[in-house]
Amino acid sequence: MKKTIVLLILPLLCGMVRAHDFVVTLDGQKVYFNITSEIHRTVEVTYNGGIADGKPTYYVGELTVPAKVRHNNKVYKVTAIGPKAFSGADRMTGVVLPSGLTSIGDFAFEGCTSLSRVIFPGNSVTFGQGVFFRCDKIRDVSLGSDWKEVDLRMFRWSDSLAFIDIPVKMERVRNLKSLKCLDSVTVDPNNSRFSAKGGVLYDKSGKTLYGCPRAYKGKVVVPEGTETVLVGALMDCYGVTAVDLPASLVSMSFREFGQLSGLSEIEFRGDAPMMTAEREGEKVFLLQVKNRDVKIAVPQKSRKVYREALVTAAGEYTEINGDKPYLVESGSMPYEKNIISAGK
């Protein structure tokens, strides 16, 4: 019985010794491949040796992964970056991924601590878990021109990614707020779903402010025509010092400014205060702030009505048409005297 077990285990151990089927030298660097289909002539990039070896593959500088490679007089299409393919390549500074690539496996670039530039192919790509885990230097990312959606959370480990450009066919952007160092967003002008104004993400019409990058600094000017600030759009933008809100705005959360310690002024351009919260079924003008001395600038003719409408009583409030109560303490509300005429 023991002999039978040994004979069964030996082929498994032999299969773990080598993770790749062949190797190709590109610009003086060895890249390892697995054949994924002989029929369709496809391969994936993989690592050298066994997955348990703990030996990172050292690539230096920027690597361009080819769309096709030749092996034994056969041409194979590169359709995948396999799990942990470049794991531990801490001297790789950039990677250009090929057209036709369809998937990137779990932890493919884990620990690539010098990786700063990633160029994706135009076609859509599926991603595994932790693809860029511990890649903290990524600062230049080119998303695929034909991508319909992107989950920016894959770059959440980066301390350097300050700018993202949304390509023309993008229809869904997920987890914009996961990028702690992002300070600006731009959008291809021909995109039918999104637009950007002053580095901030809006819908195409400009009526809805989707999100302000978390590392945005200075004054946010929301343009006339914007009607809605989505809940959380400004909430964690700690570098924002002032917010200018248009007369067209009709919907915004009372909690939007509650964490902004550097906020010194909020300007409302509307002639009448906007209802931002509910209490016991009544809509009210409530602002939760981190800095109670924040100035609230309003049209001169409307200063009295704003002061009369501003809620200063502590208690439980909900979002407009919401049902979750939030306890608002008096110390997190601005004073009535802070309402001043705009321009003063």
Image: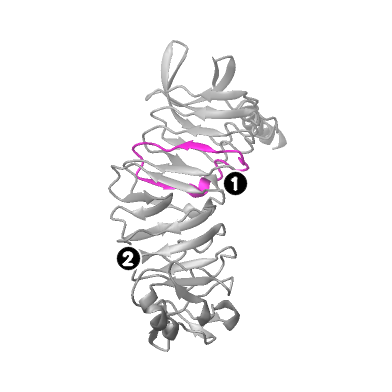
Q: Callout 2: 10 Å neighbours few (<14), some, many (20+)?
A: many
Label 2, on which residue? 227
Q: Mark yes or no: residue 55 visible.
A: yes
The stretch drawn in magenta includes residue 250: no
Out of 333 and 54, give the one closest to the viewer.
333
Marks 2 and 1: which is nearer the front? 2
Q: Tell me which corner region of the image, top left, top right, bottom left or bottom right, holds residue 332.
A: bottom right
Which residue: 32% across, 65% down?
A: 227
Element marked by disc 2: loop
209 lies above or below 267: above
Q: Position of residue 207 (x, y in %)?
A: 31, 60
Out of 73 and 208, give the one closest to the viewer.
208
314 lies above or below 18: below
Q: Amino acid at mark 1?
A: Trp
Instruction: State which region is magenta.
Output: 128-154
Q: Position of residue 15 (x, y in %)?
A: 61, 28
Q: What separation in Å lies between label 2 and label 1 (alpha carbons)?
A: 34 Å
User: What number is the disc on residue 157?
Assistant: 1
120 relative position to 247: left or right: right
Main SS of residues in magenta: loop
Q: Position of residue 107 (x, y in %)?
A: 57, 40
Which residue: 56% across, 21% down?
A: 31
